Amino acid sequence: MDIKTEVLIIGGGATGTGIARDLSLRAIPCVLVEKGDLASGASGRNHGLLHSGARYAVSDPEAARECISENRILRRIAGHCIEETGGLFISLSEDSPQFRERFLMACEEAGIPTALYSRDQALELEPELNPDLLSAVKVPDGAINPFELVRANAKDAERHGAKLLFHTGITSLLIDQNQVRGGLALDLLSGEDYKIEASFVVNATGAWVNQVLKLAGLRIDMALSKGSMLITNQRLNQRVINRCRPASDGDIVVPNETVSILGTTSVRSEEVEDFEVTPPEVSLLLTEASRMIPAIRGARLIRAYAGIRPLFQSGGTGGDRQISRSFALIDHGERDGLKNLMTITGGKLITYRLMAERTSDLICRKMGVDVSCSTHLKPLPVVAESLRPKDRLQKIAPGGEVLCDCELVRREELEEILETMQFRDIRDILHRTRLAKGTCQGGFCVYRLLGLLHESGLVKESPNKVLKAFLEERWKGIRPILWGGALKEEELIESIYKGIFNLKDSVEFGVGSSE
Amino acid sequence: MTKVPMTEAKVWPTSNADACIRCATCMAICPVSRVTPLFPGPKQAGPGAERFRRPGDPSVDSWIDLCIGCHLCDMVCASGVNISELNLLAKAKYLDEKGRPLRDWLLTHTYLYGWLGSLFSPVVNWLLKNSAIKWMVEVILKIDRRRQLPGYQSPTFRQWFRSHHSKGDRRIAYFYGCYVNTNEVEVGKATVEVLEANGFEVTLPAQECCGIPMLGNGDFKGARKMGLQNVPNLLKTIRSGSEIIFSSTSCGHMIRHEYNRLLGIPGSEEVAEHIFDLFEFLRNLKESGSLNTHFKELPLKAAYFAPCHLRSLNIGLPALEILRLIPGLQLENIDADCCGLGGTFGFKKEKYEISQEIGKDLKQAIDRSKPEIVLTDCEGCRLQIRHLTGLKVLHPVQVLRDALLQRTDEEMG
């Protein structure tokens, strides 16, 4: 099944799908390969912040300007993926008032609209804020659903002729006289391999860029920075709450649908696949975030997770917080003498579209075609009428079987999704439905899902094996937050899996599994 | 009428939905979700849905109105989640937004017109039983015609008490409630007579409806208004050195728990310490050795049903303990959940079927027991059990009175 195309894009995150959409809107044929599912790297592992750019206004004005400009574009083209919550930068007694002044000025220079609120005004808007706060600056932050955004880009790209291949890796690059000509692809689920011939190859693999470049014997300087986040069981704030001080750990709480996400840490990492949130990170996030919202101390957490920020090092020293959040588009023809290969990395979720535009512009220049970008003008399509929490609440009664009690996913909804997608991996379903994303993190619903999949003959291997793989992955996310109510619930879930499903010896449960 | 400001948010109980571990024990006991798929059950409606409700958003979960308010979920929850309170708050928000029909106002404000019912009881009772009227009431007000609205009695309990001269060594105050006053005067008389037989002089503190009908219908404002009127009067009685008893477990539950916890009424904590269920009070007398136990043999086969609000008071089943002292009385404790009436719930046309379906279990349990009469502390349960079984249903104090006073008659004779 060899494929011939104009551009081969490696990486199915926001950037990769953004490029696929941009190119296909310009009628340039392209194929995207992704070794996992959509958004399985940093695009799906962030706090879902629609940046206003205010966070970078003081330290990185260029990134700030990019953010606010893309922020405005995304509100226009991706309204259905965004909740326009607004954001506050709050100053506490220990935060320097001089910083707040610099911050306000820097925002103005970057074109980020602000408004200064008194303590009382801020508390009226956000009653859970620390009552000791001095003031708050309002900025146009928001919440964005990264899965919806990436899915929307993927759908629009496909609609305009792009081909997207998931669970497919690139095992080698086809290189012919200092020029890339495509790559060898491997279907990771079926084991089938085939050739993809392309005039251009774009490496949009985020933290994995050097693994792809290695196939061409190349390397760029990257700083991989692990950022950890915690999710609360209930939403505590209605606006994005930031700390008005130089960027540091635990300075943001993003409201996202039914939860709040506390972020982040910044830990240098060499590992891109297998990383966990450590106890010191959990303590740090709780200590810092509860300075802003004291109720966080007593709130129940449902999961800890981390993503790897792919930061491009253009030189210079200093901590990872000092590296620019601007992106880098590298033409390996110019840099390394390997023509028609480019790497796009760095940047933020919010600037994915701009990154895609610049990359596509470069390809057009090389191709000698003159078609301009239109991704900032055309609205992204709505993928599936995904239900907002309110609609879910309304629909659970009457009748209908609810598979996931926490996120209120009905059997009906799941069956519809199974009809429209080609089922390959259980995680693909979870991303698309929010099943297993709630309080119990799938403890009570994934076995119901497996029952359904088994009935419809979609699971080829033993369901217990799939269940085990899911539980092991799940364990990573909940182990760091197991205390209090969450620990009690985990004991119950553990007894269900051990007692009813007899997974006793095969799953690593931390709680009481000393036998 | 004085305007009562809506309580500030801070007095509402805070949600502890986070404590739910999804064990679903509450789903196994909920009487409503057991009989209808229209209500998703306590776990979903309470801590589950709580994650999806946002302060500024209008409510959408119209099914929340189906929570019957029995508190059984709270009682079985091993994690101490205040499920029924979460439901009630959500229901109040939903009904505040949607608006309440005239029917709900009428059902919850009987205290305003009950005296009229008593005054014209012969006519009123005839009207209430008239099938043409019942049909009209169903069409216009959506009160189910299959349900018999309670009849009115004249004179009222309070009027009767005015000409009754209570005497005793110690004083006890009686919160009798609206229903005893205008609809089941006998229960009030029996309570007074039993207390007098135990050496108490009974007094009646100034009182209004306790407010539970409003609260059950999510009308916090109305309920709070009643509480704000009652608490100062009850405090006056308590501070003059008298304890208070109630014979209606629903009124009692309202005053003892909801006044403080849900409505934040000043002084309600002090009232809660001095107000007792009638049989709880008698049980205390028994424990201190001062209960009058000169009972006549009462050859009677009775079934006892413990109302939800009694169970929620966490005082055990004191009526059962006291009645078991009566020789000859064969008493079976009926093991069934909620009776299904839920105060005003079962009168509403759209909820009648659900109410009846819930009651089925109780009816079957009573049928199996084949009693001559049924005893229960709550007026709502009594109405429902009469409706379900056609049997004679009394308050336990009425049987206790018979066992005590007939003996006195004999002695006198």
Image (tube, coloured by chain):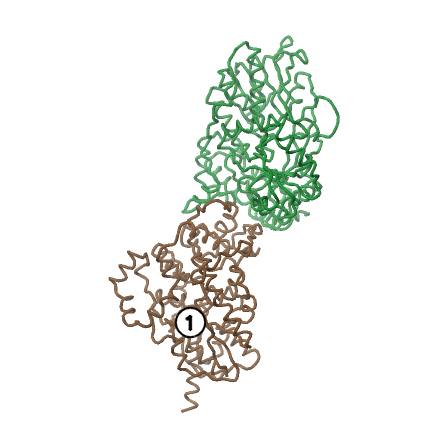
| Residue A218 picture location, percent across and down | 68, 17
Foreground residue among A130 and B290 = A130
Is residue B27 visible in the rendered structure shown here?
no
| Residue B351 picture location, percent across and down | 37, 56
The residue shown at (61%, 26%) is A65
A466 over B175 or under it: above or below: above
Foreground residue among A248 and A421 = A248
Q: Is residue A417 left or right of residue B77?
A: left
B263 over A148 or under it: above or below: below
Instruction: In the picture, one chain is brown; tell me its letter.
Output: B
Q: Quadrant of residue A16?
A: top right
B125 over A235 or under it: above or below: below
Q: Quadrant of residue A69?
A: top right
Instruction: In the picture, one chain is green; tell me its letter.
Output: A
Residue with the most extreme bottom position? B413
Circle 1 residue: B375
Q: Is residue A164 left or right of residue B99?
A: right
A344 over A339 or under it: above or below: below
Write down the chain letter for disc 1: B
Foreground residue among B147 and B366 = B147
Foreground residue among B305 and A68 = A68
Instruction: Tell me the element at label 1.
Output: strand
Say how many tags the image has. Answer: 1
Q: Please state which amino acid type lies under the numbered disc 1.
A: Leu
The residue shown at (71%, 41%) is A280
Disc 1 residue crowd, few under 14, some 14–19, many 20+, Cα 10 Å: many
| Residue B32 picture location, percent across and down | 43, 55
Is residue B24 visible in the rendered structure shown here?
yes
Residue with the most extreme top position? A177
| Residue B64 picture location, percent across and down | 44, 51
